[in-house]
Image (cartoon, rainbow, N blue to C red):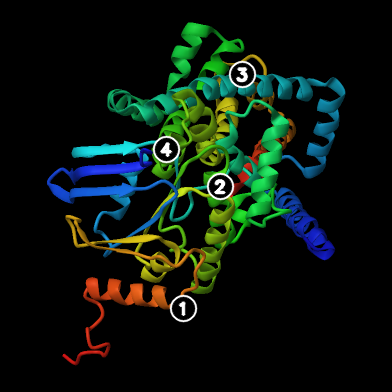
């Protein structure tokens, strides 16, 4: 990117944000909404200061990130092997595909009542819900990726005398990586959405709970603070996972 | 008496009810370059898959003595591996890392791709990729080279250069070669023997031997004569040498 291009890519989005803040201020001053239901931009800035001083925002953020990380990683380390298995073995696919599809289309939020009954309101409930949000999409995407590996790679593997285990490590896994990484990005985004909802209902801490808490205390300024943080962190998670696509042995999948 | 590297005896092959090959017997001698030409869809690739052992024939026997490696039409390289890693695929049995590295370097030099060792296939041109495939198939201790229309995805001039490359490389690394192609000129220029197959189910229609030593030029008299005979055999050249008016 050229230098002027780099400046544009920062300046233009900042201009859009500035316009949004102006509109926000205008709407606030116009009095369309009652002040208790519509915080002023400056109130939000003060809210940020308050949250930063008490440190609550930071601990809530860490709590939510911890839960998403646990649930997501658990889903990845179980979902990818399950997807590999279903992708390679026709009977396994025939047996499990309908049920995986069923759970994939069942909103994880519908599990919240059971999650509370089984796991209470600590870390376990949100982790369970995040696991459910990520596991089924990861299984399906891995399975589909295995099915679409060109057969020519199998012929090359046979030509070079690879054992089944060697073929899995050297051929199948690297061949599906680009598709799997794309799925991980999408799924991590979904997990970040789900953790907020889960904590709003089944939490005593975390960003979702903080949103609910701010609402109960009629602190709309804090509410906006939480919303800004949730959105920014979500973008950050995606940017982090995007780095995986830049690994040379994965990058080929995005070049054609 | 030495055993021949490849020997097909009365091989027939069918997919469900589709007869692809019927009663084919072909023997390929040690160090021989055999080209198999025929109309598209006549079962040439099926024949190669039988020769490589990837498929088993419906009836008859395929005897293979030695390790065979295939060069594919295109996209046979692993895109997640560099040029060097792809070539090293055939060198896994070598214990010493230094020796492997040395052999890779030698192959890279042989295909004249110095400086591209750490490039990925998608960063190379089609001709360069096919050269890497060739190097991968030749690295290590392979005996038989199976070429499945290896240059058909390339433009005409690149194809001509690739033929020269193959002929030159085979002088340095002699192998028993089976080339399957629909490019008659390619077959006549490269091979010691050209087998012409008919329409599916494929049977041998004719066989011709070339005695001019390799490497040859496409304009060598024997090559031109062979092309004429193959074209006649495939009914795409009129005997008078002129176009017949319908």
Q: Nearer the viewer, mark 2 or mark 1?
A: 1
Q: Chain of mark 2?
A: A
Tell if the residue under mark 4 belongs to the same chain as the one under mark 3. Answer: yes
Q: Which residue ends up furthest to the bottom in the rendered image?
A: B245
Q: Which residue in the structure is indicated by mark 1?
A: B219
Please state, as top left, top right, bottom left or bottom right, where the C terminus of chain A lies in the image.
Answer: bottom right
State if disc 3 and disc 4 touch (CB < 8 Å). Answer: no
Q: Which residue in the structure is indicated by mark 4?
A: A154
Q: Examine the rendering and report whether any part of residue A255 can be seen.
A: no
Residue A24: image x %, image y %?
72, 50
Whole-angstrom CA distance, mark 2 to mark 1, is 42 Å
Whole-angstrom CA distance, mark 2 to mark 3, is 28 Å
Whole-angstrom CA distance, mark 4 to mark 3, is 35 Å
What is the crowding at mark 2: few (fewer than 14 residues within 10 Å), some, or many (at least 20)? Answer: some
Residue B115: image x %, image y %?
74, 53
Q: Secondary structure at mark 1?
A: loop
Q: Chain of mark 1?
A: B
Q: Exactly how many numbered labels are in the figure?
A: 4
Q: Earlier in the sequence, mark 4 or mark 2?
A: 4
Q: Which residue in the structure is indicated by mark 2?
A: A253
Residue depicted at x 36% and y 42%: B4
What is the crowding at mark 1: few (fewer than 14 residues within 10 Å), some, or many (at least 20)? Answer: few
Q: Which residue in the structure is indicated by mark 3?
A: A70
State if disc 1 and disc 3 touch (CB < 8 Å). Answer: no
Q: Which residue ends up furthest to the left in the rendered image?
A: B17
Q: Nearer the viewer, residue A233 or B198?
A: B198
């Amino acid at each position: 990117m050229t230098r002027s291009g780099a400046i544009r890519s920062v300046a233009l989005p900042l201009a859009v944000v500035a316009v949004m803040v102006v509109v926000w201020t205008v709407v606030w001053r116009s009095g369309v909404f009652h002040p208790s239901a519509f915080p002023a931009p400056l109130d939000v800035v003060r809210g940020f200061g308050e949250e930063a001083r008490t440190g609550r925002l930071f601990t809530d953020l860490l709590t939510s990130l911890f839960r998403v990380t646990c649930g997501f990683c658990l889903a990845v380390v179980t979902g990818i092997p399950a997807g590999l298995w279903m992708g390679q073995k026709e009977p396994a696919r025939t047996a499990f595909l309908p049920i995986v599809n069923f759970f994939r289309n069942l909103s994880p939020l519908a599990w919240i009542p059971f999650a509370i009954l089984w796991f209470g309101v600590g870390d376990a409930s949100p982790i369970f819900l995040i696991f459910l949000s990520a596991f089924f999409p990861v299984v399906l995407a891995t399975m589909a990726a295995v099915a679409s590996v060109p057969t020519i790679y199998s012929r090359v593997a046979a030509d070079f005398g690879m054992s089944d285990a060697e073929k899995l490590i050297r051929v199948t896994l690297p061949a599906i990586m680009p598709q799997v990484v794309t799925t991980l990005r999408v799924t991590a985004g979904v997990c970040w959405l789900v953790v907020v909802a889960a904590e709003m209902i089944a939490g005593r801490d975390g960003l979702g709970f903080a949103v609910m808490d701010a609402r109960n205390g009629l602190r709309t300024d804090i509410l906006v603070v939480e919303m800004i943080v949730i959105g920014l962190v979500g973008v950050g998670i995606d940017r982090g996972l995007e780095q995986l696509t830049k690994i040379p042995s994965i990058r080929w999948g995005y070049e054609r | 008496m030495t055993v021949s590297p490849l020997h097909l005896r009365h091989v027939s092959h069918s997919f469900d009810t589709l007869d692809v090959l019927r009663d084919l017997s072909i023997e390929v001698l040690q160090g021989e370059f055999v080209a198999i030409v025929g109309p598209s869809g006549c079962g040439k690739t099926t024949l190669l898959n039988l020769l490589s052992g990837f498929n088993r024939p419906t009836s008859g026997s395929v005897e293979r003595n030695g390790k065979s490696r295939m060069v594919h039409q295109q996209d046979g390289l692993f895109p997640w591996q560099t040029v060097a890693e792809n070539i090293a695929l055939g060198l896994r049995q070598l214990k010493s890392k230094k020796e492997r590295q040395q052999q890779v370097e030698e192959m890279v030099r042989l295909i004249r791709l110095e400086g591209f060792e750490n490039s990925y296939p998608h960063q190379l041109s089609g001709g360069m990729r096919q050269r890497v495939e060739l190097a991968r198939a030749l690295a290590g201790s392979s005996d038989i080279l199976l070429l499945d229309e290896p240059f058909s995805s390339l433009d005409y001039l690149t194809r001509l250069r690739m033929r020269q490359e193959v002929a030159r490389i085979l002088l340095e690394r002699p192998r028993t070669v089976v080339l399957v192609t629909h490019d008659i000129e390619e077959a006549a220029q490269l091979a010691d023997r050209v087998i012409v197959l008919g329409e599916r189910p494929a049977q041998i229609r004719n066989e011709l031997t070339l005695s001019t030593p390799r490497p040859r030029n496409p304009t060598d008299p024997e090559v031109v004569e062979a092309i004429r005979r193959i074209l006649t055999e495939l009914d795409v050249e009129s005997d008078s040498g002129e176009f017949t008016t319908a």
